[in-house]
Image (spheres, grey):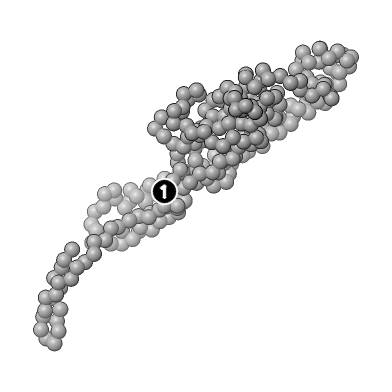
């Protein structure tokens, strides 16, 4: 942009042509947290309000932007409260699981052992186990179960950790014949994936422990991460796919 500026030198006014570089105004927030963006927006709104004589009416109005900030603060408080509730429920669920185990171990097993009197067929018919025998090799579970999600932890910023268990919940480890666990993953997208129908999902690195970890980028916040799990044997054959597990990525 070229402008003419009149400059007085020794009592004489001269017209000087100067070039003014075009300036692009930005509201830079890349890599910022939700809370940081709200604080910056609130500050900008205050500054804009202070220059209302120059900027005149804004669309949306300053008041509307500041209300957006307040709405975001309330949503953040609601999220924290919901996460606290989830954490409380996780603890209660763990206590409930321990109560179930204690009730069966301390309340039922001695009586069953006494009545069974060594009858292995009767004991196994009750879906109970016998010390020293272990789980007999049976690859039927490989073809009839899938890795299911036992617990989910999103307490670390832009990270997800899932506890995995076999879908028939008969063991905490992988089923017989499974060498690892495969994972299909999709972040965001206009079409949510479905079990056995997921053209946009990508195959990630398989893992061997019954625990899955994932981390996200700043631009992923607010999107939904979708996962499907399945057993993989030593030859690379897959077991059945799990249902789709969706998780909203939070900052």
In the picture, measured across the screen, residue 163 lies left or right of residue 126, that is: left
Q: Residue 89 at x, y = what percent?
A: 62, 35
In the image, residue 229 sits, relative to residue 73, either above or below, namely: above
Q: Residue at x 11, y 79 (%)?
A: 14
Q: Report whether 30 appears left or right of 230.
A: left
* Residue 227 against residue 168 in the figure, above or below: below
Q: Residue furthest front?
A: 235
| Residue 89 seen in render | no
**Residue lying furthest bottom:** 10
Q: Position of residue 214 (x, y in %)?
A: 56, 41
104 on left or right of 241: right
Q: What residue is at 57 percent from the left and 29 percent from the top?
A: 229
Callout 1 environment at 10 Å: few (<14), some (14 to 19), or many (20+)?
some
Helix, strand or loop for disc 1: helix
Residue 249 seen from this side? yes
- Between residue 53 and residue 125, name the one nearer to us: 125
Residue 199 location, x and y as percent? 44, 28
Question: Where does the image place residue 131, in percent across and percent down from the top left?
Answer: 84, 24
Rendered position, 120 above or below 33: above
Left or right position of 111 against 32: right
Count numbered badges in the picture.
Answer: 1
- Depth check: 251 or 146 in front? 146
Q: Which residue is mark 1?
A: 70
Q: Image point 44% across, 46% down: which residue?
A: 219
Closer to the camera in the image, 179 or 171: 179
In the rendered image, the quadrant that contains the N terminus is bottom left
Residue located at (58% from left, 25% from top)? 238
């Amino acid at each position: 942009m070229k402008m003419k500026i009149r400059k007085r030198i020794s009592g004489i006014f001269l017209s000087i042509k100067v070039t003014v570089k075009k300036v692009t105004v930005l509201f830079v927030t890349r890599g910022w947290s939700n809370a940081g963006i709200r604080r910056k927006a609130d500050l900008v709104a205050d500054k804009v309000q202070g220059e209302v004589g120059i900027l005149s009416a804004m669309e949306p109005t300053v008041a509307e932007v500041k209300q957006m900030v307040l709405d975001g603060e309330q949503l953040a408080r609601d999220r924290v409260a919901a996460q606290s509730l989830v954490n409380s429920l996780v603890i209660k669920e763990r206590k409930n699981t321990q109560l179930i185990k204690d009730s069966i171990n301390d309340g039922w097993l001695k009586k069953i052992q006494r009545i069974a009197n060594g009858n292995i067929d009767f004991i196994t018919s009750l879906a109970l186990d016998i010390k020293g025998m272990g789980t007999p090799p049976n690859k039927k579970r490989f073809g009839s179960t899938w890795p299911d999600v036992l617990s989910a932890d999103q307490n670390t910023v832009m990270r997800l950790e899932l506890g995995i268990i076999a879908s028939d919940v008969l063991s905490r480890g992988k089923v017989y014949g499974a060498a690892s666990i495969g994972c299909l993953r999709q972040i965001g997208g206009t079409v949510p994936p479905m079990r056995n129908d997921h053209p946009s999902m990508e195959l990630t690195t398989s893992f061997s422990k019954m625990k899955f970890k994932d981390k996200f980028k700043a631009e992923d916040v607010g999107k939904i991460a979708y996962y499907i799990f399945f057993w993989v044997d030593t030859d690379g054959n897959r077991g059945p796919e799990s249902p789709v597990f969706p998780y909203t990525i939070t900052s």
